[in-house]
Image (spheres, coloured by chain):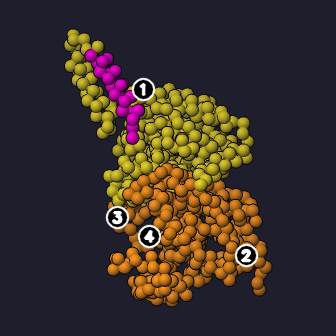
Chain colours: A yellow, B orange
Amino acid sequence: MAQPVIRELKLVSFLEFEKPIAALQERIDALEGSAEGSPVNIAAETRKLRKKVDSELARIYANLTPWQKAQVARHPNRPHFTDFAEALFTDFEPLAGDRYFAEDEAIMGGMARFNGRPVMIIGHEKGRDTAGRLKHNFGMGRPEGYRKAVRLMQMADRFGLPVLTFVDTAGAFPGIEAEERGAAEALAQGTAACLRLGVPMIATITGEGGSGGALALAAANRVLMLEHGFYAVISPEGCASILWRAAEKAENAAAAMRISAKELKELKLIDRIVGEPLGGAHRDRAAVFATLSDAIGDELASLEGLNADELRRQRREKFLAMAQAA
Amino acid sequence: MSWLNNLRPRLKFLQKKDSPDNLWMKCRGCGQMIFQRDLAQNLHVCPQCDHHERIGPVDRFTQLFDGGTYRTIATPKVADDPLKFRDQKPYPARLKAARAATGDNEAFLVARGAIGGVDTVMGVQNFAYMGGSMGMGVGSAFVAGAREALKHGLPYVVCTASGGARMQEGLFSLMQMPRATVAIEELNEAGLPYVVVLTDPTTGGVTASYAMLGDIQISEPRALIGLAGQRVIEQTIREKLPEGFQRAEFLLEHGMIDKVVHRKDLAAVLGRLLGMMTGQVKDAA
């Protein structure tokens, strides 16, 4: 495994419900600033404050509402596809284009090595800064992106490479051109391609699992979910604006739809929850890379040795069972 | 009038009779008042402007199966409210209202009959039932229809009509997309035709799964077909949408469907195609 590059991000933007932590952090920063070149020993005081930060984080994150989880899942500093590709894999060779129309950088993919074993990795990339977000269209895939994903999956199948996907999207891009070029058909083919694979497929919902745009990369043998990710048939805001006729009711919609990893695991709609460090993946990326790498390694090991028919059969049966009898 | 409207359904002797309320209706295409009986006799297509009015499973079965004869296939009963979903109205109350309005248990019915002499299983989605939304019940009915076709080696025709996934079932509704996809894959592998008739409207998760995976895709004229809702697109790109956007003819022009077929020709077109795809019918000439 490659060394993760960023150990700790200094610049963390705080979410609304993290205000107490922001205040503590400000005091720490102020103390450290004033201490420069001064003889006063502030170590004890900052240590105390840092302990307070940890206990506050633990308290807040143990009681996150589904809506707060959605905000954590969308946190701008949350690791993205590019980060996972760099940290969990070696020899990543990005591959581009759908061979019909264009290259769509909202969905990235390519071959890489996972613990030395060649695999195909595919995922949504939201972009890190303004320029990046525009380049990657905020992680909202156009038909071309999904057709590229299908192409890479089919190639993986031919060369016996397990497919590992990383899902983080608000949904497929809603635009005129996307509809003209068959966005719905591209998603349908994405899901069908996942279900057809004769190689192991493991999907991880790393942040936002936004409806059909997420599913098209996630009809996998194993669906993992980071602890603070969410996975939903429609965004909480979208659901609220339709059923409550008020987008502000997103909090109610998020709760009603059961979008959290814990709830979805209980409903048997996902297979495994991958724990996040205290305060979310963005507070300690190295930790989340290590945990996720281990989880994917485990699941991959459990699928190795199954032949193509068996992998397909198990995957199909798993999804066919996703309805509750009366 | 409101007390009268409330009273009327409770007076059983009044129900069978045509009341002025339902003798006439306003065409959603041209706005003209049409005599209901004329509309029904014209396959629910406006005689003035050719607007194809939305129709339910029973009308569809009657129109498409030879001689209007068919046998309905039972579909599985599923849990009604898996998430105990509450918005402004509890989900079970919405189901109850939809069941009372349509007389059906779910928004998708399956039947078997002949189309142009070809023994066929057909599924029809009902927009009048909670907007034809896809939840576990619809997914299970879709799969049951496909399995019936598979068991007897028959083609599967599905008429779609849906606003998309049923949000009240959360991620269960999204998971009906891979369920239906698996059922279609099984038909493909068995060499059985899967034909989609897209009717007004077909949007969201239904379009993004079984509505777009047909061997052949046929649409009724002017049907709205798309992934994203028009309001969502307008809000995202901050532009007015072009005339005819996401209509059947627009999809035909962009290569997403095979044909746009008038309702009066639909049974004949399906019969011809199914005859050639299955080899069940010998050349009529």
The stretch in magenta equals A45-65
Q: Output the chain of dot 1.
A: A
- The residue to which callout 4 is attached is B245
Q: Answer above or below: position of A261 versus B150.
A: above
x, y percent for residue A124: 48, 45
Q: Mark 2 Cα within 10 Å, few/some/many (few <14, many 20+)? A: many
Q: Gap in Å between the C-alphas at discs 1 and 4? A: 49 Å
Q: Gap in Å between the C-alphas at discs 2 and 4? A: 35 Å
Q: Output the chain of dot 2.
A: B
Amino acid found under the numbered disc labelled 1: Arg
Q: Which residue is drawn at 42% across and 87% down?
A: B20
Q: Which residue is drawn at 38% across and 55% down?
A: A240
Amino acid found under the numbered disc labelled 3: Glu
Q: Nearer the viewer, mark 1 or mark 2?
A: 2
- The residue to which callout 3 is attached is B239
- The residue to which callout 1 is attached is A7
